[in-house]
Amino acid sequence: DAKTTQPPSMDCAEGRAANLPCNHSTISGNEYVYWYRQIHSQGPQYIIHGLKNNETNEMASLIITEDRKSSTLILPHATLRDTAVYYCIVRGNTPLVFGKGTRLSVIA
Amino acid sequence: SAVISQKPSRDICQRGTSLTIQCQVDSQVTMMFWYRQQPGQSLTLIATANQGSEATYESGFVIDKFPISRPNLTFSTLTVSNMSPEDSSIYLCSVAGTGVQPQHFGDGTRLSIL
């Protein structure tokens, strides 16, 4: 599976958009980009995934660059409950392999 | 998505003993996995639980230490054997359908070894 690079931590003001970047320059053609988050003391929560087109659901938007070497997860209006570790994972037909993720702190 | 229940949710055990963790899913799933999360760390894949056959273990994990069963499409167990303080972790069950369908996770079993 391709390796991903994420900043270790980010801050975001409550009510503002949180933009979480991820680099995955070695992604293969059949690998998808997945985003999960883990709130303290809970199991990882699936957020969104995509192959090459931008995706949106009730939780977030996923923007994937045309060359697929990077992506951005967008939480449009961050709340305090969005404070968590966010994981960007590139995966084909294999189990998820977690990196260290980005610790997002939403500040009031 | 599937509802995943793990038992126990937490336990405190004596070193040298073994504990079996159960994972029950409310619907049939193709894939089941077990992960470990050590304190302050990310998740590490232990093994893929295969129905009716031996689990597929990742490098650094062996069947004698982490025996896994999967008798059907909704249930799996992970045993942590001959526990030591280094086994203190959160153990998580994860499930997925076929192909690139997202994996989903239970809330894990928080295990402390004294």
Image (tube, coloured by chain):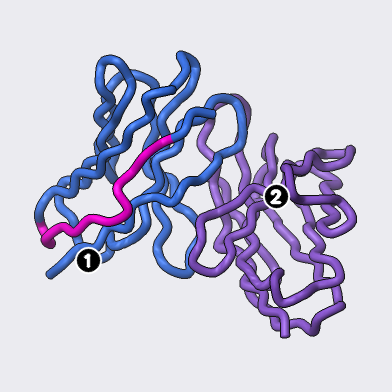
Q: Which residue sits at x=76%, y=42%? A: B73
Residue A9 is inside the magenta segment? yes
Helix, strand or loop for disc 2:
strand
Query: On the rendered image, what quadrant is the C terminus of chain A found in?
Result: bottom left
Horizontal and vertical percent for residue B36?
63, 58
Q: Nearer the viewer, mark 2 or mark 1?
A: 2
Evaluate whether label 2 is on the same chain as label 1: no
- Residue receiving disc 1: A80
Query: On the rendered image, what quadrant is the N terminus of chain A found in?
Result: top right
Side of B28 relative to A36 (left or right): right
Q: Is residue B111 above or below residue A76?
A: below
Q: Chain of mark 2?
A: B
Residues rendered magenta in the picture: A4-15
Horizontal and vertical percent for residue B79?
81, 62
- Dividing the picture into quadrants, the one containing residue B32 is top right
Q: Is residue A59 above or below residue A92?
A: below
Residue A11 is inside the magenta segment? yes
Q: Are marks 2 and 1 in contact (CB under 8 Å)?
A: no
Helix, strand or loop for disc 1:
helix
Q: Which residue sits at x=53%, y=31%? A: B101
- Residue receiving disc 2: B46
- Dividing the picture into quadrants, the one containing residue B51 is top right
Q: Chain of mark 1?
A: A
Marker disc for residue A3: none
* Numbered-mark total: 2
- Per the model, the C-alpha gap separating discs 2 and 1 is 32 Å
Which hue is chain B drawn in?
purple
Q: Check disc 1 and give the amino acid type.
A: Leu
Which chain is represented by blue in the image? A
Horizontal and vertical percent for residue A85?
37, 57
